[in-house]
Image: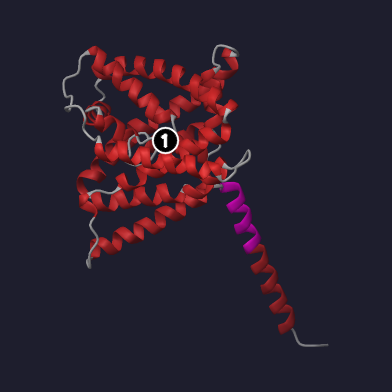
Amino acid sequence: MLNFFFLLIVGIGGIAPGLSGSVLLVILGLYQKTIDAIGTIFKNFKKNIVFLFPIFLGFGVGVILFSKVVDFLLENYEMHTRFAFLGLVLGTIPLFYKEVKKEGFSKKYYILIAIAAIAGFSLFYFNKNLFPTITNPNIFQSVLLGVAVAGSSIVPGVDSAVILSSLGLYELYVGSLADFNLQVLIPAGVGLVIGALVISFLINKLIKRFYTGTFSIIFGLFLSIIPNVLNSSCTLGWNINSVISIFILIISFGVSFFLGDVKANVKKIKEWFRLLKDLKQEDEIRALPKQ
């Protein structure tokens, strides 16, 4: 049940521009377990299915629930919403960087991160809308939609919205989810399963063999999508909308940073309250009349 509710949140990353669902999986400590379960699903089928069922159910429900919410917010409060997404993305950087360094790190990996970030930024910035927008897809295009969603969702730091927009599939993706268009969603689901199995298998092998190098590239790609969170609607000025947007950015950053290591942060908060309580008791003791 806990994994299900976590994946409801991850579902936001499946549709929100600039917010990667797989990054949220990294933050929640579920990424490697999920990739390993998908990549080796037939080795221990029953155990992997039991683990993956609430994962996929939560993600699917989260995407369906939040697709309408995100669509509404982007349509009516685009600037505020995009600054909220930016805060959520920036708040994940410290823990993601910690994840990269978990199994050894040297200066050469900074070069790998920089190359991946530059390559990713160039790809996303110069190659947007490579293909015309697809509104009435055939079966092959619907399956391709599922494969694209799988790939962009599984690789942390790859923005699903940017990839789908480049392929002309983003409007189809959001629209079919909002309208629950089974004619598109069923073949897309087939593509999603195929893409998830193949890509997870490859990523799992890379992580096990080249952990730091793989995560360095992923982290670089993640950094490259950050400028794409904002667009021309997000111009700051001396007005109330800008003030509200900055406030939302700060709050979103705080929420994301806190969720990045919930257990450690909750422990710190408890320690702070315990310290304040001890200080209060000391003050009360000092205030007592001396006998």
Stretch in magenta = 262-272
- Can residue 1 be seen here? no
Give the quadrant of residue 289.
bottom right
**Looking at the image, which is closer to me, 132 or 138?**
132
Residue 244 locus on image (x, y percent)? 29, 61
Query: Which residue is located at x 22 percent, y 68 percent?
Result: 238
Residue 35 in percent (x, y) is at: 52, 25
Q: Nearer the viewer, residue 242 or 267?
A: 242
Which residue is depicted at the point 26% across and 45% down?
Answer: 73
Q: Nearer the viewer, residue 204 or 79?
A: 204
Residue 112: x, y in percent?
48, 39
Picture layout, residue 18 above or below residue 83: above
Question: Residue at the location (43% across, 36% down)?
Answer: 10
The way the protein has been coloured in the rendering is secondary structure
Three-letter residue code for mark 1? Gly
Side (left or right) of 246 relative to 179: right
What is the chief secondary structure element of the magenta stretch?
Answer: helix
Q: Is residue 231 visible?
A: yes
Q: Which residue, given by chain and number where applicable, does mark 1 sit on?
A: 21
Q: Is residue 280 left or right of residue 176?
A: right
Residue 164: percent from left, percent from top: 28, 30
Q: Position of 167 compared to 21: left or right?
A: left
Up/down of 211 relative to 183, above or below: below
